[in-house]
Image (tube, helix red, strand yellow):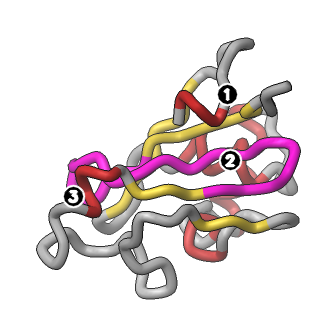
Amino acid sequence: MRKQIHRRGNVFVHQQPAGVVWQDDKGFHFLYHPAYVAQQPAAPPISLTMPVRAEPYYSKTELFPFFDNLIPEGWLLDLATETWKLSAYDRMGLLLTVCRDCIGAVHVEGEIPEDALTPDNV
């Protein structure tokens, strides 16, 4: 039986597709696109803590600190949670909703999940 992907977003660096971040029953994952990895050493990593590599990154319990730090804080977080009716504790939901237009080189475009999404589609 295949595991369902609950939520997923495309990650861009300088408007170039760089990878995919997703959450499923096992936790949080990030994977650089093979085409992005093939551009090494020219393609920059999304973060110094997440260098470009072919293997996926995995976190069982929490969103990766780099992605979590893209989410606004303080009054901007309050505004986002009120506007989109999200919990401040739903870090993946916030990432996919409010990080389409971030300050800096990286942004995340959330996708609407489909019932049939599987890790094979990532």
- Mark drawn on residue 102: none
Q: Is residue 19 magenta?
A: yes
Of residues 69 and 47, the one drawn nearer to the viewer in this rendering: 47
- Comparing labels 3 and 1, the label whose residue is closer to the camera: 1
Amino acid type, callout 3: His
Badge 2 or badge 1: first in the primary sequence: 2
Query: Quarter of the image holding residue 88?
Result: bottom right
Q: Secondary structure at mark 1?
A: loop
Q: Residue at x 76, y 32 (%)?
A: 6
Relative to residue 13, is residue 98 depicted above or below? above
Prevailing SS of the magenta stretch: strand
Other-residue count near label 3 (Cα within 10 Å), few / some / many at <14 / 14–19 / ≥20? few
Q: Residue 92's spot in the image, x, y percent?
A: 71, 49
Residue 35 lies in the magenta stretch: no
Report the Cα–Cα distance between label 2 and label 3. Answer: 21 Å
Mark 3 lies on residue: 14
Question: Which residue has dot 1 on it?
Answer: 118
Residue 70: percent from the left, percent from the top?
54, 65
Disc 2: which residue: 94
Identity of the residue drawn at 81% across and 55% down:
27
Q: Which residues are magenta?
A: 11-29
Q: Quadrant of the N terminus?
A: top right
The residue at the far top in this view is 115
Which of the two labelled residues, at mark 2 and mark 3, occupies the earlier sequence position? 3
Tell me the mark number nearer the camera, choosing from 2 and 1: 1
Which one is earlier in the sequence, the residue at label 3 or at label 1? Answer: 3
- Residue 97 at x, y = what percent? 60, 39
Identify the element where label 2 is drawn. Answer: helix
Q: Amino acid at mark 1?
A: Thr
Mark 2 burial class by Cα count in 10 Å: few <14, some 14-19, many 20+: many
Quadrant in the picture for residue 40: bottom left
